[in-house]
Image (spheres, rainbow, N blue to C red):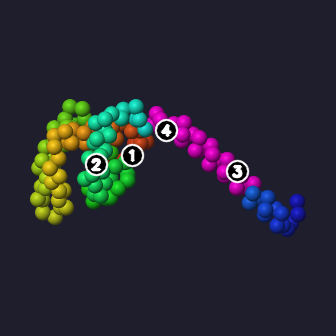
Amino acid sequence: MSETFTKGMARNIYFGGSVFFFLVFLALTYHSEQTFPERSNEAAITESVVRGKLVWEQNNCIGCHTLLGEGAYFAPELGNVYVRRGGEAGFKPYLHAWLKAQPLGVPGRRAMPQFNLSEDEVNDLADFLKWTSQINTNDWPPNKEG
């Protein structure tokens, strides 16, 4: 092999590396597309979940909370709130009571506004949060309390 590094060698390394990493990108994209349906919990989307997402969006919950790591960091992560606040047996009563008690008025703490949601809206929001808790997120968030 020559002791000098020629322009042709540099060009071949550049194009060869570009092709290699493009193929790696395509393979990872294919893998993601194949595993997405089983990870997304798409089969569990109901009308109530869709309405709950609408409640989430209309009240700009993501302006303070994070959901699966996306959103603001003023308030707790809600991707696993269903699991950590009662699950099937106790989450809906918990959410109803929590939302009715707002704002708490604790000194030194940002107050969550009172949204005056109807019973149906709270139930739909609870179903949406239940659905998000069942998405396979590879154990995100890393700690239980979000």
| Image position of 73 with respect to 122: above or below | below
Mark sitting earlier along the chain (1/2):
2
Mark sitting earlier along the chain (1/3):
3
The kind of residue on which mark 4 rests is: Phe
| Image position of 62 with respect to 140: above or below | below
Q: Is residue 145 visible?
A: no
Using a 10 Å C-alpha cutoff, classify the residue at mark 2 as few (fewer than 14 neighbours), some (14 to 19) or many (20 or more): some
Which of the two discs, 4 and 2, sits closer to the camera? 2
Mark sitting earlier along the chain (4/1):
4
Q: Which residue is identified by label 4?
A: 36
Q: How far, Cα to Cα, is label 4 from label 2? A: 23 Å
Using a 10 Å C-alpha cutoff, classify the residue at mark 3 as few (fewer than 14 neighbours), some (14 to 19) or many (20 or more): few
Classify mark 2: helix, strand or loop: helix
Classify mark 1: helix, strand or loop: loop
The span shown in magenta is 16-39
> Most prominent secondary structure in the magenta stretch?
helix
Q: How far, Cα to Cα, is label 1 from label 3? A: 31 Å
Q: Percent from the top left, x then y, of residue 94?
A: 17, 41
Classify mark 3: helix, strand or loop: helix
Mark sitting earlier along the chain (2/3):
3
Q: How far, Cα to Cα, is label 4 from label 1? A: 16 Å
**Residue drawn at x 88%, y 60% as measured from the top left:** 1
Which of the two discs, 4 and 1, sits closer to the camera? 4
The answer to whether mark 4 and mark 1 are in CB contact below 8 A is no
Q: How far, Cα to Cα, is label 1 from label 2? A: 20 Å
Using a 10 Å C-alpha cutoff, classify the residue at mark 1 as few (fewer than 14 neighbours), some (14 to 19) or many (20 or more): some
| Image position of 139 with respect to 8: above or below | above
